[in-house]
Image (spheres, grey):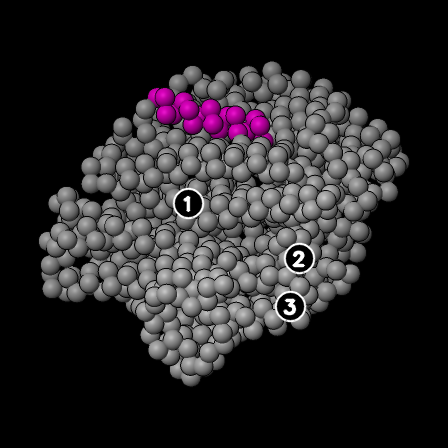
Amino acid sequence: MTKELTLTFASTVVDLARLQFATTSIYHFLFVPLTLGLGPIVAIFQTLWHRSGQEHWLRLTRFFGTLLLINFAIGVATGLVQEFEFGMNWSVYSRFVGNVFGAPLAVEGLAAFALESTFFGLWIFGWNRLSPRLHLATLWIAVLGTWLSGYFILVANSWMQHPVGYKIVDGEAQLTSVWALLSNDFALRAYLHTMLAGLIFGSIVVLGVCCWHFLRGDEVDLFRKAAKVALIVAVPVTALQLVVGNRFGEAVTSAQSMKIAASEAQWNTCQPCGFSLFQIGGFSKDDQTPSFSITIPKLLSYMATGSFDGQVQGLTPLQKQEQRKYGRDNYMPNIRVIYWSMRVMAFAGVLMFLVAALGAWLYWKKKLERARWFHWTALVAIALPYIAATAGWILTEMGRQPWIVQGLLKTSEANSPNVSTTWLGISLGVFIALYITLGVVDFVLMRRYARPDRPTPKEELPEPAVTY
Amino acid sequence: MDLQILWFVLIAVLWSAYFLLEGFDFGVGMLLPFLPKDERERGQMFQTIGPVWDGNEVWLVIAGGATFAAFPAWYGTMFSGFYLALLLVLFFLIIRVVSFEWREKSESPRWRTAWMWANAVGSFGASLIWGVGLSNLLYGVPINSSGDFSGTFWDLFSGYTVLGGVTIVTLFAFHGSTFLTLRTTGDLCERAAATARRLSVVAALIVAAFLSWTVAVAVDRNDKDVFPPILPAALGIAAVALAVLFVLGRRSGWAFVMTALATVLWVATIFTSLYPRVMVSSTDFANSLTVDSASSAHYALAVMSVVAAIFLPLVLLYQGWTYHVFRARVGGDEVEAPPLAPTAGGAG
């Protein structure tokens, strides 16, 4: 009985730690991709200003630059929590993986985060102190920093999904090849997928904000120029993401068969396999056949393997396989959550492509600033990248369960043994309260500085001057 | 040299860099409610650290990441053991980080006052906890045989560790005031210098007391001889004493150099007293974590060493350049230049 009690208790500690990690990392990732995508767009505006000397590009640089910085501040603040949280809530995990997983995190700080933090500082305060060319360079360097940062973080995360370049010594993972770690196929595909997501965030948000101004008839000429840049980014990027997301799926199929099977609620091995667009029921062992479903023949085979006749393993045989390999346990993630997070992400991705394509068509027909129905659509579409990214991370992280490091360490055995439910409860409460407050203030500020009747500028545009 | 020792030294260096740089940021933050007499001067104080605070905080991120990578067991035990303390640090740092960007987004006096206090309280709280936290590594906390912290939140507080926190708060305030003396002009600069004079003697006495006590703790609780811990401790006391002399003699440049040195030597004294342990166990001394037992394997350390050899000088170089770019004093007749003026100027 004591043992049972301990087990129940332990599972609540792990559940709370997981809830905390999910909350803080999803929240962090609401701000990160906008920085990744808005950064280069603002840098493009400033480059255009630098090249042409036309004032409207400078105004757009400053307008969207303000949004970028309001957003960047929260990204920084919440990023620190992520770094600390591994050690605070997951000390067993930290000791097990530190040798491998710690390296990309440390390199991220040294090679990337230092770059972005220092150079954003230079950019913000350097308007009147640096030559225009140097000042423009500081922004591009800061953007480079954010993109490098994303790479190292995804190298670290991908090692949890598909561990490479290590050996296990005395129950701890030890790095054996840094090259294998950095060129992990899973990481490269995840990186491309995530950076494209960032550009989608940036371009869809810029497009939505422009449409808000069209709707109010505010500075239509100015925002038409911004909308054009946003559409030039959004159309190819949203289209490419549909392909890249697919290719990423293939990497997942080979590294994490269970995740793919769960994301399709595919109980039995199939060949060829249809892609289920929508289904009712079919999410549990006792109810494997959906009572209603819409399926596209052969599409899943193509998405998961790259061939229309490819084989996709089912949950039931995979569960048996894993049991033989790792012992008795449940190796299936939460099927319903995984199935729907996959669909929410994919459908949002397709919708964003449609919005971008429609916007481009309207622009081409010179109707963009008059199509009010589209303005509302684009404004609402600002929510789509946020929804897609959140669903994507839920799929990635919950789809890996019960593992914290695929095939090596289970989540239930990785938490800090000395951290009690009380401590976890307190910290979760503090983070939720703090994050809600920050989120509300951020939203109010973003809205205030993005809206047509934003605070009027107090000063004239500065004369960028060379002081030395 | 053994790579484990190299990384122990590097982590000490990273903490030193963090304390040296963010130390004056925190100091400026703590002085915000007291030093300026109007909103314009508050803006000037914010401006002295505005361009650099984020770059300075990077050193904490690097120190954390490096500890994770080079000493996973240390990272795991320290971060899970100092749980509530680190939660508080995160809270303080977050409210402080957003205060920089958000304060100027509205002209409303209540809004501005609120974020000024967020910065001040965040700076004070984070300084206090870092002081208490690092002192605890040496003073010892309950660690069981599997290397886990087995105490409570209150085990982090003893006379010695609380003095460690108070020392860091005072030293950072002093360091911040010598920094402001160099970075401002006119009346604000005068008052910063006066504050530095007032803080100097108190800071010197507290630092001297704490560093002496540290040597005693190293001998008592960490099985060390008086030498070498006495060396950085004595130098630290000398630095802070010289800082007093320079402040009173109105040599503000040298005064800043000395408060910076005192900050670095504070960290150096703790780490010298710690070696070869990284966390002392107060329950069973044998459970203490050591450089050997807590470190990563050779290959990972070698890779990290190469990365550090390339990027550390690079980061120092461009951060140094940043200080050069923003070397002009803030203030005088110059209107507070709002970052990204036209839209971010923030008229209410």
Q: Does B125 appear in magenta?
A: yes
Q: Taking A25 as reference, is A221 left or right?
A: left
Q: Position of residue B137 (x, y in %)?
A: 74, 37
Residue bearing mark 3: A323
Name the amino acid type tagged 1: Phe
Looking at the rendered image, the quarter that the N terminus of chain A falls into is: top right
Q: Which residues are magenta?
A: B109-126
**Image x and y of residue A166, in percent:** 67, 67
Q: On the image, which quarter does residue B284 sit in?
A: top right
Q: Secondary structure at mark 1?
A: helix
Tag 2 and tag 1 share a subunit: yes
- Identify the residue at horizontal 32%, vertical 29% (top origin): B106
Principal SS element in the magenta part?
Answer: helix
How busy is the neighbourhood of tag 1: few (under 14 within 10 Å), some, or many (20 plus)?
Answer: many
The chain that hosts pointer 2 is A
| Rendered position, A104 above or below A81 | below
Q: Which residue is mark 1?
A: A72
Image point (46%, 49%), residue name: A26
